[in-house]
Image (cartoon, rainbow, N blue to C red):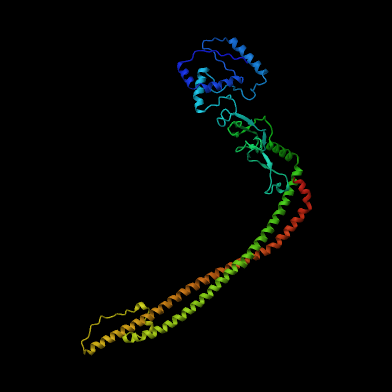
């Protein structure tokens, strides 16, 4: 196509700016013109009549309809970003925006990647369209159809795209999937759109950003709508079949409940029997052994207390007589009752027999008091050990009582399940017989 550009004077400030950074913008301008872009630069004083504009638009419409490279089906926004406002404004924007890398001026504003992806990703590619179903087959953990029948469940979300929906492959390398990392809702027609750099790198590697793009559809019935209409039609026209289906489902439910009751009873019987044998009876035996040991200890402590009582009587008798106290053993309540006083004796004058005798009497009384005190302390310790043994015995006896109650409760539980099991098994056999006689027909009715 012929190119005509009307040249007009430029401001001095713009000329200085262009001289500083003219090379890159002008190099960008030439490919755009060579690729068929239309740029009109009209002098400010040019006068265009309304009739001329109408005629020009009519010629453009005819040209577009006959042009095999017309891409209006993709977008009608065919202006290049930064080109509006005349050449003065255009070149200013080229210098300013090119400097910061904020504009993709080699693609039109309506291009899918104009405002998506990185600066170098100006190429667009898309996959086929894929329908994201609203209903998907319901399967068990093994991947088989649940309950042996083909049932459907509501889909929640679509993750990713089919493998290889858009891939880039260099010779001798494995395909690189460009669609990944996005999700889509169920019940929509989606395609994967990619903005990429067409491998225009030093090492020839591809870089791209993928997006989920919904393809608008005309009004139509989706899976849930179709299923609802089918169910409504079935419910309205198949009353007898529906009643038979409900009856069969109730029959199968009763059979399953009877089987569950037998299984639960057997499980409870086994569990309670095991608990009785390995826990309750064992705990009772340990508690009884502990009581027997406590009884032996208590008897030994009582024997020791009696021995210490006899020893105290012997040690304290002389002290009681020498001190003038009542010589009965019950008079000495405990060792704290005794107060052995060691007197501060002064030296006697030589030959003072009375003084020396007094000192010997007081020292002998003090020694007897000390021996009585030691014997009383031993008797007090023996009594304390008896009290400790009695407390331990009472605790053990309480534990034995609790263990016996637990054993009895567990035995009652075992007996209760044993009594219930035969009746439950009879009920299951009756339900199984009823179900098996109608199973084939019911399976057909419940499809």
Q: Position of residue 1 (x, y in %)?
A: 63, 16
Q: Residue 377 occupies which quadrant of the picture?
A: bottom left
User: Which is more toward the observer, 46 or 340?
Assistant: 46
Q: Residue 386 occupies which quadrant of the picture?
A: bottom left
Q: Residue at x 36, y 78 (%)?
A: 335
**Residue 126 position (above or below residue 334):** above
User: Which is more toward the observer, 42 or 261?
Assistant: 42
Q: Position of residue 192 (x, y in %)?
A: 63, 34
Q: Residue 338 occupies which quadrant of the picture?
A: bottom left
Judge left or right: residue 50 versus residue 11.
right
Q: Position of residue 165 (x, y in %)?
A: 66, 35
Q: Position of residue 398 (x, y in %)?
A: 52, 70
Judge left or right: residue 78 versus residue 233.
left
* Total numbered labels: 0
Q: Residue at x 31, y 85 (%)?
A: 364
Judge left or right: residue 151 versus residue 114.
right
**Residue 298 position (above or below residue 70):** below
**Residue 54 position (above or below residue 256):** above
Q: Quadrant of the C terminus?
A: top right
**Residue 383 position (above or below residue 236):** below
Q: Residue at x 63, y 64 (%)?
A: 272
User: Which is more toward the observer, 68 or 17?
Assistant: 17
């Amino acid at each position: 196509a012929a190119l005509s550009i009307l040249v007009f004077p430029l401001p001095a400030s713009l000329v200085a700016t262009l001289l500083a950074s003219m090379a890159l913008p002008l190099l960008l301008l030439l490919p755009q013109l060579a690729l068929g872009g239309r740029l009109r630069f009209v002098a400010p004083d040019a006068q265009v009549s309304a009739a001329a504009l109408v005629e020009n638009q009519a010629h453009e419409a005819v040209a577009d309809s006959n042009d095999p490279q017309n891409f209006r089906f993709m977008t009608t926004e065919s202006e290049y970003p930064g080109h509006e406002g005349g050449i003065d404004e255009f070149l200013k924007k080229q210098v300013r925006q090119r400097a910061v890398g904020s504009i993709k001026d080699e693609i039109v504003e309506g291009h899918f990647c104009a405002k998506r992806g990185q600066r170098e990703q100006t190429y667009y590619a898309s996959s086929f369209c894929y329908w994201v179903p609203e209903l998907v087959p319901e399967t068990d953990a093994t991947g088989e159809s649940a309950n042996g029948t083909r049932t459907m469940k509501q889909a929640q979300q679509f993750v990713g795209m089919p493998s290889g929906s858009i891939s880039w492959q260099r010779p001798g390398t494995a395909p690189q999937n460009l669609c990944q990392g996005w999700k889509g809702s169920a019940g929509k027609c989606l395609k994967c759109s990619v903005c990429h750099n067409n491998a225009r790198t030093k090492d020839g590697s591809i870089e791209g950003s993928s997006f989920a793009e919904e393809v608008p559809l005309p009004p139509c019935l989706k899976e849930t709508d179709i299923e609802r209409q089918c169910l409504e039609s079935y419910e309205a026209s198949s009353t007898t079949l529906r009643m038979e289906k409900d009856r069969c489902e109730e029959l199968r439910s009763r059979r399953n409940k009877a089987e569950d009751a037998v299984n639960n009873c057997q499980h409870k019987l086994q569990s309670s029997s095991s608990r009785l044998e390995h826990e309750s009876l064992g705990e009772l035996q340990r508690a009884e052994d502990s009581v027997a040991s406590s009884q032996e200890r208590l008897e030994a402590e009582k024997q020791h207390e009696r021995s210490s009582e006899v020893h105290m009587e012997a040690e304290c008798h002389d002290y009681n007589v020498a001190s003038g106290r009542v010589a009965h053993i019950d008079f000495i309540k405990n060792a704290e009752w005794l107060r052995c006083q060691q007197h501060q004796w002064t030296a006697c004058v030589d030959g003072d027999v009375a003084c020396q005798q007094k000192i010997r009497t007081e020292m002998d009384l003090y020694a007897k008091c000390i021996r009585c005190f030691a014997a009383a302390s031993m008797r007090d310790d023996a009594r304390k050990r008896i009290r400790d043994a009695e407390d331990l015995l009472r605790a053990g006896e309480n534990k034995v009582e609790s263990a016996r109650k637990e054993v009895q409760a567990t035995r009652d539980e075992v007996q209760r399940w044993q009594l219930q099991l035969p009746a439950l098994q009879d009920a299951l056999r009756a339900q199984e017989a009823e179900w098996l006689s109608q199973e084939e027909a019911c399976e057909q009715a419940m499809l």
